[in-house]
Image: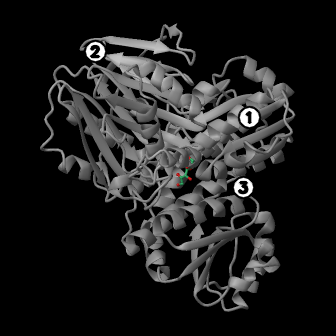
Amino acid sequence: MCGIFGICGTISKSSVNQCIEGLKKLEYRGYDSSGIALLDEGGIQVVRSTGKVEALEKKLNHLKDKKTISIAHTRWATHGGVVEINAHPHLDEEGSLALVHNGIIENFYEIKERLQSEGVRFSSQTDTEVIAHLFGKLYTNDLLTTTSSVIQQLEGAFAIACIHKNHPDTLLVTTRDKPLIIAVEPQSGQILVASDLNALYEGEFEIFYLQDNQIALIEQNKIRLFNKDLIPLNPNFEPVKIENTPHFKGEFAHFMLKEIYEQPSAIRRTLEGRYDIELNRILLNLPKSFDEVSKKVQKVIFLGCGTSYHAGCITAHFLEEFVKIEAQAEIASEFRYSEPLINPDTLVIAISQSGETADTIGAIREAKNHRAKILSITNVANSSIIRESDYYLLTQAGPEISVCSTKAFTSQLTLLYLVTLYIYQIRNQGLSSHPNWLKALRMLPAQVESVLQKKGEIQGLAKKTVNFEKVLFIGRQYMYYTALESSLKLKEISYLFTLCYPAGELKHGPLALIDEKTLTIALLGHQPTFAKTCSNIQEVQARKGPVLALYNKSQHLEQIQPEYSFLIDQEILEPFKPILYAVVLQLYAYYIALEKETDIDYPKNLAKSVTVE
Ligand code: F6R
């Protein structure tokens, strides 16, 4: 799950600098290690480094950067530890070729054993190195036929960029099940390859998305494209204008904090133009055929991973409760192998901030096999998931840099509320005005702002509770799903061991974990089950477990008297409460991580976009 960048035909700018710039923009795909290989008449030069791209940059001063072809890579470790020897590019035994890879070669072990038995020596633990050695073994002076023989033996998913010293004018790329773009800058004739559009610099490009098993040989001003049978093809380029907005933290210590504070405007932008207050109508500007889908739909399935899955859980609950259609949220990595009971009357709503998550793409493809209709909700225009879907809507959160997702989540929820209300409106010839959904949605940005104003109090709670060794989150109904999300936030950036359970489940096992060292964070927001959750809190307290309770204005805590508490004093409809509770607990997680001095924006072992299974 890595980022690939490559250049052919550098005319004016330094190709090394361009690779570094490209890699930095791809770091959200992994930041364990990075590397670069340059090809010119003198052969191949390779430099690699562990850590972020900055570390690689510092090692590059000695590289001779003439008219070169370059490939570069930023890695998120799948096979083999985070050590320099496992960083890409990987070479064949002779050092004749270098390649970078995104994906997983599932039969790498068999190929490796076979090659080893033939005397090939490996220097890394990666699956990628088998591709390099296989290439070296099968090499016939012809890059195209060699590549074709190599990929015929590979099982799994890959996007590969490769250079060979016998072909100093050629950059080769091929892919299966992984995105890879070829971008031509018409003005300079420079040709770039990259895992996605995010890697490109500002300007106008002609873009081609390489399809499964295609092979492209890129030379200066020339691209030759072939299918798996080596039949030449004409690439269909489309124009794309890249507008890079530089990412600054401004007055904030971390991107995460900045993004938490951007939530009122992100929600406002996501709502903008999507309703008519006079007519009490939602306007999604989707193709007319979506109305037909909404009328006929018998089942709605929300797909996503991590935070996006949690947004799906909350909305599935809302949709089933309000629109009265069967709805469920599924973890994409499970769904794709589950033989789901879906049909053309099922609407699948795929949720993904990045639009690139491999498991979500796999799950969409599974749903499409059953002819379900796909609506995707993403934050990134032109992303892979959009291209896989029948319909799409964009959240307007703006680029999210911090690995830990905050504003993307609350923007997803905002948009998913609109979608739910829209489906209701289509099926019921209008939106009910009791409650006044639109008014409630429009109040959300200001309500989030009020929560953010209490950051001092939240930081105080974090300071008081930072020494607990374990944290258990509990909630019921909407608050359970919100607790799941909050538990993920806390573990992700503080590295604390956190768990989450529906409050009623405690007595069926998790109570055994309760002691003085375990903090229970109870989300009491759901009014209909308030008394029940209070009883569960008392069960925790009876076992000496300290409690931090988050509660609403109309709720009274006399009966439980928790050690710590936080009041959310806005009047808000039940389905919208998750937004306010999530914001409080995002800040709480942030301040706990700050106390623990972790790398908040780039937590260990993670990546922003998960492009492998
Ligand atoms: C957690 C987080 C992840 C992502 C997940 C899905 O803070 O960011 O759990 O939500 O990897 O990513 P997307 O939404 O890009 O598909």
Left or right position of 472 against 90 = right
Q: Position of residue 472 (x, y in %)?
A: 64, 75
Mark 2 against mark 1, which lies toward the viewer? 2
Find residue 220 and name its label: 2
Of residues 231 and 2, the one drawn nearer to the viewer in this rendering: 231
Q: Which residue is mark 3?
A: 574
Question: Helix or strand or loop: what does disc 2 sit on?
Answer: loop
Q: Count neighbours of disc 2 (C-alpha within 10 A) and say few if under 14, some if 14 to 19, many if 20 or more.
A: some
**Element type where label 3 sits in the image:** helix
Where is mark 1, residue-wise?
366
The mark nearer the N terminus, 3 or 2, is: 2
Q: Residue at x 84, y 35 (%)?
A: 342
In the picture, measured across the screen, residue 84 lies left or right of residue 80, that is: left
Q: In whole angstroms, how far apart are the C-alphas of marks 3 and 1?
A: 33 Å
Q: What crowding class fits label 1: few (fewer than 14 Cα within 10 Å), some (14-19), or many (20 or more)?
A: many
Observer-nearest of 430 and 353: 353
Residue 3 visible, this angle: yes
**Image side of residue 164 versus residue 528, left or right:** left
